[in-house]
Amino acid sequence: MEYLIIWIAVAVLSGYYANQKGRNVVSWVVLGFFLSVFALIALWFLPPLGIADKRSDIARKLDMSGRYRKCPSCAELVENEAIKCKHCHVDLPALAE
């Protein structure tokens, strides 16, 4: 009986850590139930999903460099046509054509 409680606790713990890394909780609870500690070890080595998605969003914006520029005050991306930064509300210098 104690082993079953520990087994279920490991499965729930796998789901918790999967949630922390941006992965599907239900799948990892099931995997944690069937694979026990091995699911926790696999989660240890998997990278978080959220960071890669944010990096790809920023890279996508920077690839469109003809459309965006950095604000000199706060370094956030703003469109070239902007007169004021939408983040810090500082007046932007005119672009040299």
Image (spheres, grey):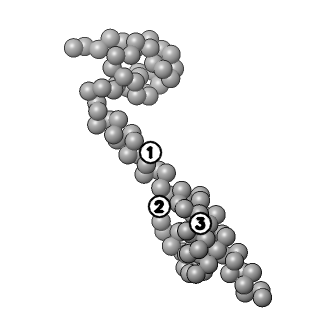
Mark 3 vs mark 1: in front: 3
Where is residue 47 drawn, in percent x and y?
47, 61
Circle 2 crowding by C-alpha within 10 Å: few under 14, some 14–19, many from 20: few
Task: Quote the CA–CA distance across marks 3 and 2.
Answer: 18 Å
Residue 82 sits in quarter: top left
Q: Name the residue beneath numbered marker 3.
A: 26
Circle 1 crowding by C-alpha within 10 Å: few under 14, some 14–19, many from 20: few
Taking depth in this image into account, of 32 and 65 the one nearest to the observer is 32
Disc nearer the start of the sequence (3/2): 3
Q: Which mark is residue 54?
A: 1
Q: Name the residue beneath numbered marker 2.
A: 47
Quadrant position of the C terminus in the picture = top left
Task: Quote the CA–CA distance across marks 3 and 1.
Answer: 24 Å
**Residue at 48% of width from left, 68% of height from top?**
45
Circle 3 crowding by C-alpha within 10 Å: few under 14, some 14–19, many from 20: some
Q: Is residue 20 left or right of residue 60?
A: right
Tell me the kind of residue under disc 1: Lys
Task: Quote the CA–CA distance across marks 1 and 2.
Answer: 13 Å
Residue 81 sits in quarter: top left
